[in-house]
Image: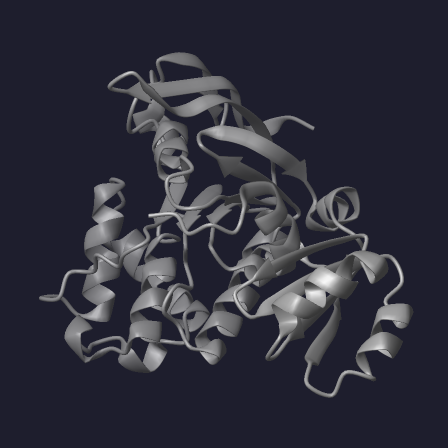
Amino acid sequence: MTAVLSAQNLYKSYAGQAVVNNVSLAINRGECFGLLGPNGAGKTTTLRLLLGLIAPDSGELSLLGRAVPQHAREARLRVGVVPQIDNLDPDFSVAENLMVYGRYFGMHDAEIEARIPALLDFANLAHKRDVKIPTLSGGMKRRLTLARALVNDPDVIFLDEPTTGLDPQARHLIWQRLRELAAQGKTLLLTTHFMDEAERLCHRLAILDQGRMIAQDSPRALIAQHIEPQVVEVFGEGVALWAQDHAAHYAKRFEVTGETAFCYVDDAQPLLAHLQGHGGLRYLYRPANLEDVFLKLTGRELRE
């Protein structure tokens, strides 16, 4: 398949420090591709490079068949962007925000007006068409920002942490809308700190750390490649001492973080039987997930 968005050996540094270090990727039409990484991993700089907002020190970029950043302006006419922080104009109504944004793409008012009802239905905001932005809830503003990114009927949509700060109902609605866009053939590039979001939405994803791409594949393949299939989280008073004495016997690999021992196993039954005899300890048994992979590859230490 011909990639809608491709990058080869992207490199960008600031003050001699590599921020994006030889990153390569190719995203196909109709694919939701995730870009994950801890704070400072290089995600934002990578997005800016892919959009042609900054130029790489070296490497090659193509967006919708156009070389970037040389022809980034032309390519961005077919791109929608959902920024991390909503930047809606508070002086305008919901519909007026869509109208003004459409004009940035050179669209005629009649063309924009014809698209507004469907965009508002998509965002479940038809009943808020004429209200001003400050009266909207956080979830409504986020949905409007997503609808605004679609005003030019883009082929590629960049979504920078689209559900941060939303309640579960709003998150699930946005997930549903993003699946609908991918089913329509739209190409999505998603950054998120929610591993369950990436696991649900992304066909493939890449994990960045310190500017380098350290893994790339489908969520299911990454889990199979990098982590044991079952996890038992053991917590309670004395868990550190328990882990020191027993975890290595039952777990293929374990980590103790705070008051929790994470035990990674191929077969959890022997460990579960053992834990039933330790009344002071509690445990949670679950399948391995993308967050386990992420923490194994990037570490559990806090990033500032």
Residue 288 figure quarter: bottom right
- x, y (%) of residue 22? 50, 19
Colouring chosen for the image of the structure: one colour
Image: 244 above or below 24: below
Q: Is residue 292 above or below residue 74?
A: below
* Residue farthest to the top, as pictured: 58
Image position of 187 with respect to 71: above or below: below
Give 193 or 266, whichever is nearer the viewer. 266
Residue 180 seen in this snapshot:
no
Q: Which residue is pictured at 90% across the width and 70% down the height?
A: 270
Quarter of the image holding residue 162? bottom left
How far across and how far down the image is residue 252, in percent?
81, 52
Q: Locate residue 134, reporting x and y percent.
A: 16, 75
Q: Quadrant of the N terminus?
A: top right
- Between residues 302 and 140, which one lies in front from this camera angle? 302
On screen, residue 141 versus residue 230, left or right, reads left
Task: Using the rendered view, name the quadrant where residue 238 is placed.
Answer: bottom right
Q: Is residue 163 above or below residue 64?
A: below
Farthest left residue in view: 91
Q: Nearer the viewer, residue 292 or 178?
A: 292
Residue 160, position as x, y percentages in the image: 39, 50
